[in-house]
Amino acid sequence: MIDSIKDKVRELLDSGEIKGFLGLAEKHGHVAPHLFQQGEDLDIMVLGDGAHPGDARYPLSKYLINLYRAYPEETFGILVRGCDDRALKTLYTWNQLTPNKVIPVGIACPQELADACECSRPYPDDITAGEQAEPRLSETVDTIDNLVLTDRFDYWMSEFVKCIKCYGCSNICPMCFCNECSLKCDDLIKKGELPPEIPVFHHTRAMHMVGRCIDCGLCEEACPSGIPLRTLYKKVNTILSSNFDFTTGMRRGQRSPLNSLEPVKGNK
Amino acid sequence: MDYRTVLTTCTYCGCGCNFFLEVLDGDPIGTIPCKTSPVNEGKLCIKGWNVHEFIRNDKRLKQPMIRKDGHLTEVSWDEALAYTAQRLKDIKAQDGPDAIGFLTSAKVTNEENYLLQKFARAAINTNNVDHCARL
Amino acid sequence: MLKFSGIDDARLKASWVSSAEAPELVHEFATFIRELRDLGPSPLRQDYRKELA
C-alpha cells in the first residue's frame, strides 16, 4: 500500500510538479509530520499506522496552511485520508488554501479505522492506495439521544467538568484558523476559571463547528481529559445534514448553509 | 525552504511530554504533540501547547546576571561561576553549610538534578535541596 | 443542541414581535415567564465545579 504512495510522490517530486510533499515519516521511533523535498529518500515514509490503523494521524492540512502562507506561489503535495480530503475542500471554501497549489495523494482507510471513527466517507475522491471501506453511521450520537433528558444533562456535565481549558481541541483542529477566537474572548468566556464555564465553553465551540467540522476526530484524541468531543460535533453535523441536507467537505465549493443568504432546501 | 518537525521534550514540568516543534526557515511556528509518545499520547496541557512562543521571547535571559550596585548586569559565564563559587565558600565559612540551600529545576535533566543534589550534600554538606516540580 | 445536552428546549424561545405590537410583546413575556416557572429552576444553576473539588 505504501509503495504505490511512494511511487506517486517520487514521480511528483521528480517532475518538479510539487515543491514538497507533506506526509508522515518515522523519526526517532515516532511517527512525525514531515515535508519530503526533492531528491530526498522516501524510505522513512509511513502512513501513521501503529498498533491500530491510523492511530498516529496528524492534521496535515493545518500545517499545509502554514506552508501556504509562507510560500503562496509554491505547489505542495499532501497525504490525505477521507477526513483530510473533506478538510481540504472546506479550507478551499474558506479561502485558506488554493486548490491549484495543492496536490492530494489519497489513501482509503481500512474498515477497522472506518468503524472506529464511525466515518461517513472513509476515503478521499482520488484513491492512490487502499480499498474503499464501508461508511458507518454514528451510534454514539444515537446512544446519547436515547437517554432521558436529565441523564443526558448529567452525562454531559460530568464530562465537561473535566475540562482543563488546554485549548488542545482548537489547537489540533484543522478547521481552527481564525485570528480572533471566541473561546479566548474575555467577554464570552471568563478568564482564570477552571473548569471554564460549562457547558457554555463547549457549546460555543460546538456552534463554531457548524459548517467547519469535517469529523476527523483529532480533537477527541488530543483531549487530555477524554471528553467525547467528537460525539458532540457529530451531533452538530447530524443536525446540519438532516435540516439543511449539508455535509461539511463533501462537495467542492459548497458553502455552509449558515454562511449563505440564499434560501436553503430542507425540511425546516 | 526549510520545514522541519523537531522531536523534543517539554521543558515546563517533570512529566516529560514529547512533541514536535514545527520549524519553518529556522523559526519555531507551532507545537505538535507526539501521538506515538507513551508519555502524553498526543495530548498536551496549555503550557505545552504554547512552548514554541517562549523560545524567541525578548524577555528571555540569555546571559548570567550579577547584581552590581543595585542593578542586574550581564556578565560572562566565567565571572558568574567564579563569583558564585567564592560566595558559596564565604557563606559556608562564615555561617556553616546549612545557611545555603539549593533549588533545582524541572527544566534540566534527571542527571543534572542528581548532580546538583550530589554537589549540595558532598561538596557543601547540606541537605537543603528542593525542586520546583515538587508542587 | 440544547436537547442533546440534556437541557429542556422549552427554556429557550424565539418570537417575532413588531415594535408596533406592545400588547403582543407583553403577552409573550408573561406566557414565557409562566412556562419557565412551571419548569422550575434550571439545572444549570447547580455548581458542578464544586462537586469536582
Image (tube, coloured by chain):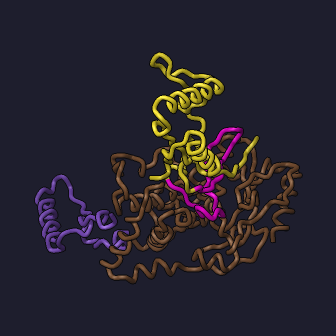
Chain colours: A brown, B yellow, C purple
- Residue extending farthest to the top is B69
Point out residue A204 in the picture as x, y percentages from the top left corner.
40, 58
Point out residue B10 in the picture as x, y percentages from the top left corner.
59, 50
In the displayed structure, A245 sits above or below A183; it is below
Q: Quadrant of the N terminus of chain A?
A: bottom right
Give the number of callouts. Answer: 0
Q: Is residue B124 left or right of residue A68?
A: left
Residue lying at 28% horizontally and 73% vertically, measured from the top left: C8
In the displayed structure, A144 sits above or below A40; it is below
Q: Which segment did they paint magenta?
A: B16-45
Residue lying at 47% horizontally and 52% vertically, measured from the top left: B134
Please tell me in which quadrant of the rendered image residue A105 appears: bottom right
In the displayed structure, B6 sits above or below A155; it is above
Point out residue B44 in the picture as x, y percentages from the top left corner.
54, 57
| B20 is within the stretch colored magenta | yes
Nearest the eye: A260 or A148: A148
Please tell me in which quadrant of the rendered image residue A216 appears: bottom right
In the displayed structure, A90 sits above or below A66; it is below
Q: Is residue C28 left or right of residue B127?
A: left
Point out residue A46 in the picture as x, y percentages from the top left corner.
77, 64
Q: Quadrant of the C terminus of chain A?
A: bottom left
| C30 is within the stretch colored magenta | no
Residue lying at 60% horizontally and 26% vertically, measured from the top left: B80
Query: Could one spot residue A92 in this view of the protein?
Result: no
Q: Is residue A50 left or right of residue A183?
A: right
Query: Could one spot residue B14 in this view of the protein?
Result: yes
